Amino acid sequence: MGLAARVAHGLQLHREEAYRPLTFFQVQLHRRAWYQLLTLDFQFSIDRGTDAAVPTNGYNTRLPLNLNDTDFDCDSPMTQVESTEPTEMTLMMIATEIQVMIRRLSLVPVCQTTSFT
């Protein structure tokens, strides 16, 4: 998992500003790949009982849009309207939002000093 995270960082998948020169198609694929990596990283960290390889505050990539694979292609314009209906992405997006929320909740800093006076 560590190698996959390093490759993703090398490709700048974790930074939204790196997507500016890309097409809509490329942006959506990069976002999908990044959030799939985060989900796998989270699952592996639970299985191993260790911290995730990607820190919660270590990325700013937005979620991919709720679109079917057939709703966009290499020639799609940069502005697309997200579907309000269930799509092929719906389950992945639900799982992603849940794991992001659990990451944030589980990484709440513990108070360093406790006073019992």
Image (spheres, rainbow, N blue to C red):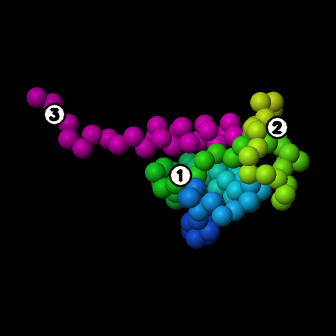
Question: Mark 1 Cα within 10 Å, few/some/many (few <14, many 20+)?
Answer: few
**Residue 59, percent from left and from top:** 52, 54
Callout 1 secondary element: loop
Amino acid type at image mark 3 = Ser
Q: CA distance from mark 2 to mark 1?
A: 24 Å
- Which disc number belongs to residue 110? none
Q: CA distance from mark 1 to mark 3?
A: 36 Å
In this view, the residue in front, 109 or 90, is 90
Residue drawn 89% across the image and 48% down it: 70
In this view, the residue in front, 6 or 45, is 6
- Which disc number belongs to residue 115? 3
- Please tell me which of labels 3 and 2 falls first in the chain: 2
Whether tag 1 and tag 3 are in contact, CB under 8 A, the answer is no
Q: Which residues are magenta?
A: 93-117
Residue at the extreme left? 117
Which residue is under mark 1? Answer: 60
**Residue 89, percent from left and from top:** 77, 42
Residue drawn 58% across the image and 55% down it: 16
- Does 88 appear above or below 13? above
Residue drawn 58% across the image and 70% down it: 10
- Does 117 appear above or below 88? above
- Does 49 appear above or below 2? above
